[in-house]
Image (cartoon, grey):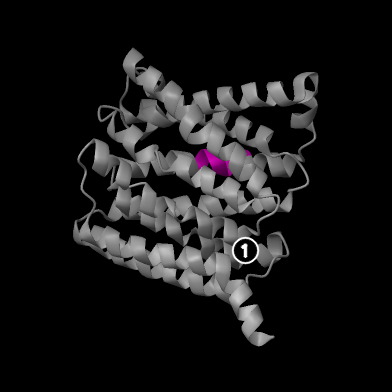
């Protein structure tokens, strides 16, 4: 399960570089077609796995689970891509590290899982990193981007809890629905951003890039994440995904020359320490108590 979540995180970390390769597009346009191609990729996967049983897999998901998972995926992914157009990749990545806090606070009521001491220590370390980067962002006059970014980990936490609560069911179909919802919602909201064709108004080159981005950066990682969620506790899921804050800024740095802020390195080091504690800390504390 941990391996699956690590692979998912590696795939998600490619978001920053893809967004930087399409500077002429805003968050609505990117998310419209990224969501569409993600869902197409997931649908191909589901048909390949279940064949004629595919529709039954969609219908097997309880309505509340479908609405929560699809809805918060749509909200979270739209806000995430939008925030990347407002603040740096490093800033949104590290702010996303606050997801374990929200996951830990809600998990006793949603999934019945109570985070241990190691999980809370790791989450507290993550918040230190978040504070460092957020303070730097506020100093740069990016308050709106910071506020939008904070909504992303809340959405991600709720979606993670839904996957854990209904871990006995394949939730990939719900995420597939969420991608198509994102396609229509972001496409229509794009009209408010002043595009003549709404979020659907994207050139051939960008559509091709998004056709690669959707499956590579979302479809495949989400399949791994949904599988990992079956055996990994909710808070641990969120803590491992924090490695995105370390990996994500590296790709734009290497390929498009976007140098992370100095504070991103400090936050990254803290997050690596937090993930190590989340994976091994519980066993260490249990041994010490024994």
In terms of image quadrants, where is residue 19?
A: top left
Q: Which residue is mark 1?
A: 106
* Magenta-highlighted residues: 70-75
Q: Residue at x 53, y 44 (%)?
A: 7
Is 6 drawn above or below residue 128 in the view shown?
Answer: above
Tell me the quadrant of the picture where the C terminus can be found: bottom right
* Viewer-side residue, 100 vs 262: 262
Query: Quick check: 83 left or right of 166?
Result: left
Is 243 drawn above or below residue 213 in the view shown?
Answer: below
Residue 73 forms part of the magenta stretch: yes
In terms of image quadrants, where is residue 39?
A: top right
**Residue 234 in sight in this render:** yes
Q: Position of residue 125 (x, y in %)?
A: 43, 71
Query: Quick check: 120 left or right of 161?
Result: left
Q: Position of residue 46 (x, y in %)?
A: 68, 26
**Predominant secondary structure in magenta?**
helix
Query: Quick check: 21 left or right of 157?
Result: left
Q: Position of residue 54 (x, y in %)?
A: 75, 24
Is 164 drawn above or below residue 267 in the view shown?
Answer: above
Q: Position of residue 118 (x, y in %)?
A: 56, 74
Q: Residue at x 28, y 30 (%)?
A: 21
**Residue 187 in sight in this render:** no
* Viewer-side residue, 66 vs 280: 280
Q: Residue at x 61, y 36 (%)?
A: 175
Residue 288 forms part of the magenta stretch: no
> Quick one: SS at disc 1?
helix
Q: What is the crowding at mark 1: few (fewer than 14 residues within 10 Å), some, or many (at least 20)?
A: some
In terms of image quadrants, where is residue 252?
A: top left
Q: Residue at x 21, y 43 (%)?
A: 258
* Viewer-side residue, 194 vs 135: 135
């Amino acid at each position: 399960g941990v391996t699956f979540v690590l692979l998912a995180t590696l795939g998600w970390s490619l978001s920053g570089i893809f967004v930087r390769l399409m500077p002429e597009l805003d968050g609505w346009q990117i998310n419209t077609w990224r969501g569409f191609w993600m869902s197409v990729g997931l649908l191909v996967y589901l048909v390949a796995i279940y064949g004629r049983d595919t529709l039954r897999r969609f219908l097997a998901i309880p309505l509340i689970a479908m609405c929560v998972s699809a809805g918060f995926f749509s909200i979270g992914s739209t806000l995430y891509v939008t925030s990347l157009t407002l603040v740096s990749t490093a800033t949104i990545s590290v702010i996303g590290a606050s997801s374990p806090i929200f996951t830990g606070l809600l998990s006793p009521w949603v999934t019945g899982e109570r985070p241990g001491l190691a999980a809370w220590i790791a989450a507290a370390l993550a918040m230190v990193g978040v504070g460092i980067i957020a303070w730097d962002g506020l100093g740069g006059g990016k308050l709106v981007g910071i506020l939008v970014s904070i909504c992303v980990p809340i959405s991600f936490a709720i979606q993670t809890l839904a996957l854990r609560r209904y871990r006995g069911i394949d939730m990939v179909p719900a995420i597939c629905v969420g991608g198509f919802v994102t396609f229509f919602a972001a496409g229509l909201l794009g009209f408010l951003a002043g595009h003549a064709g709404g979020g659907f108004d994207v050139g051939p080159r960008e559509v091709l890039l998004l056709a690669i981005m959707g499956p590579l950066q979302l479809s495949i990682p989400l399949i791994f994440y949904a599988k990992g969620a079956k055996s990994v506790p909710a808070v641990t899921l969120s803590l491992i995904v924090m490695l995105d804050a370390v990996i994500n800024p590296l790709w734009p740095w290497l390929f498009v020359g976007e140098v992370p802020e100095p504070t991103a390195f400090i936050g990254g080091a803290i997050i690596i320490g937090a993930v190590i504690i989340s994976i091994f800390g519980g066993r260490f504390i249990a041994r010490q108590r024994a």
